[in-house]
Image (spheres, helix red, strand yellow):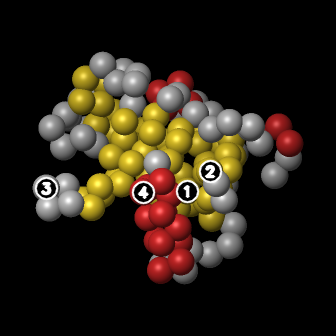
């Protein structure tokens, strides 16, 4: 990784609950060295775009960020759609899983996993 791919402040923040859950998954699933948390978007879903969240290796167009000890990879082409987004984790009776709070979303679907910007 060269210095050009490392940024100071991530466009995406992990809430304390999301950070705890990501750290738990990293340990429980024995995610190999060299993998980071990939956050991104792709076309599709009820509202036009859906979120990407998972563990992956660094790719050519990625920018890396440190989220309190969790290495995060974001394709620089996705940054505009994710700027200011907070990822939270809910573990309740009505909802369980990661939730994206995106100030750029002009429309979201009922399931919360897709949006329009």
- Who is closer to the viewer here, 35 or 98? 98
Query: Would you say residue 61 is visible in this rendering?
Result: no
Label 1 Cα crowd, 10 Å radius (few <14 / some 14-19 / many 20+): many
Q: Which mark is residue 94?
A: 3
Q: Which residue is mark 1?
A: 37
Give the distance between the C-alpha atoms of the residues marked 3 and 1, in whole angstroms. 26 Å
First of labels 4, 3 by sequence position = 4
First of labels 4, 2 by sequence position = 4
First of labels 2, 3 by sequence position = 2
- Residues at marks 4 and 2 touching, judged by CB atoms closer than 8 Å: no
Q: Nearer the viewer, mark 4 or mark 2?
A: 4
Query: Would you say residue 45 is visible in this rendering?
Result: yes
- Residue 63: give x, y in percent of width and height: 68, 41
Seen at 19% across and 34% down, the residue is: 109
- Who is closer to the viewer here, 74 or 13? 13
Label 4 Cα crowd, 10 Å radius (few <14 / some 14-19 / many 20+): some
Give the distance between the C-alpha atoms of the residues marked 4 and 3, in whole angstroms. 17 Å
Q: Which residue is mark 4?
A: 17
Label 3 Cα crowd, 10 Å radius (few <14 / some 14-19 / many 20+): few
Seen at 53% across and 77% down, the residue is: 27
- Residues at marks 4 and 3 touching, judged by CB atoms closer than 8 Å: no
First of labels 1, 4 by sequence position = 4
Q: Which mark is residue 67?
A: 2
- Who is closer to the viewer here, 115 or 15? 15
């Amino acid at each position: 990784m060269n210095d050009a791919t490392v940024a100071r402040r991530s466009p995406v923040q992990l809430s304390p609950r999301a950070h705890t859950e990501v750290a738990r998954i990293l340990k429980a699933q024995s995610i190999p060295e060299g993998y980071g948390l990939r956050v991104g978007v792709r076309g599709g879903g009820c509202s036009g775009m859906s979120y990407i969240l998972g563990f992956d290796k660094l790719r050519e167009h990625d920018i890396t960020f440190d989220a309190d000890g969790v290495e995060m990879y974001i394709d620089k082409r996705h940054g505009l759609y994710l700027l200011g987004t907070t990822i939270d984790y809910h573990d309740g009776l009505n909802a369980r899983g990661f939730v994206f709070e995106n100030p750029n979303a002009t429309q979201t679907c009922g399931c919360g996993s897709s949006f329009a910007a």
